[in-house]
Amino acid sequence: MNVPILQIDRISKSFPGGVQAVKDFSAQIERGQVVVIMGPSGSGKSTVLRCLNGLEIADGGSIVVSGVPLDGQKKNRLWIRTEVGMVFQSFNLFPHLTVLDNLNLAQVRVRKVTSAQSTARSLELLSRVGIEDKAPYFPAQLSGGQQQRVAIARALAIDPKVLLFDEPTSALDPEMINEVLDVMKDLARSGMTMVVVTHEMGFAREVSDRVVFMDEGRIVETGTPREVFDCPREQRTQRFLSQIL
């Protein structure tokens, strides 16, 4: 029997002031699946992602990645952080490093490969996202779309088992959005396991295997893109979609 690569069982997360951002979120994600999480601002989507790679510690519930629990053991948390990559909406590139050095850094430090090996891998990934010629540039010399493609290449550089995307196009000018979505579509076609928080409904319809709609920290509805977009069962889902489609 195939074991899901990502098992999430009733995780919850609260912040100071009594704000409960996530309430009993559960999901099972198979290898190669693309799962889109959508919902209004403040619904807990990004907090779920941050819990999945240990940037936030869930108050309750459990997370298991490829059979390894994300628990209090330091070795488990460190391993999961190297196997679950994340792409942020604000790029989070090191401004003082060139594009090439941004990609090389994690490979050398995390995977312990040589400088020559990391450079070869970095150039391969930059070619894959269409910006190999930008290797010697600094982030500030690139457009927003180019910076996000560098961020995706950097996340791929350590060969993660799962890739998380936190609204990767929300900080981009409209004309730059498609160049990033095209890279993500290519990743999905290649079999990368992806969990994507996004408001790009066209991407969700075309690429995702499953859509999760959240509101007020909870899962309101989940299903295939056709089920959720064309025949939503819950009134809250219907209201949300009527405002954005």
Image (cartoon, helix red, strand yellow):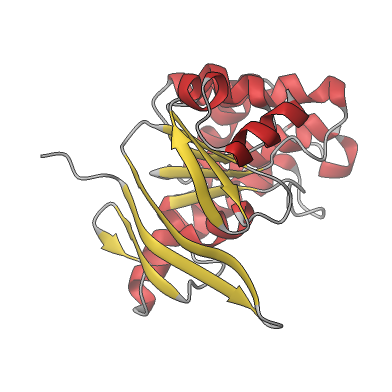
> Of 78 and 209, which appears nearest the observer?
209
Note whether residue 11 is visible: yes
> Is 165 located above or below residue 15 in the figure?
above
Identify the image quadrant of the N terminus: top left
Task: Indicate the quadrant where residue 238 lies.
Answer: top right
As drawn, is 63 to the left or to the right of 208? left
> Is 206 located above or below residue 84 in the figure?
above
Percent of width and height locating residue 233: 50, 32
> Quick one: which residue is furthest to the front in this view?
235
Note whether residue 116 is visible: no
Image point (48%, 68%), residue name? 12
Number of residue marks: 0
> Quick one: which residue is furthest to the bottom in this view?
17
Image point (62%, 41%), residue name? 236
Percent of width and height locating residue 154: 60, 43
As drawn, is 197 to the left or to the right of 17? left
As drawn, is 220 to the left or to the right of 15? left
Image point (41%, 52%), residue name? 83
> Of 75 and 169, which appears nearest the observer?
169
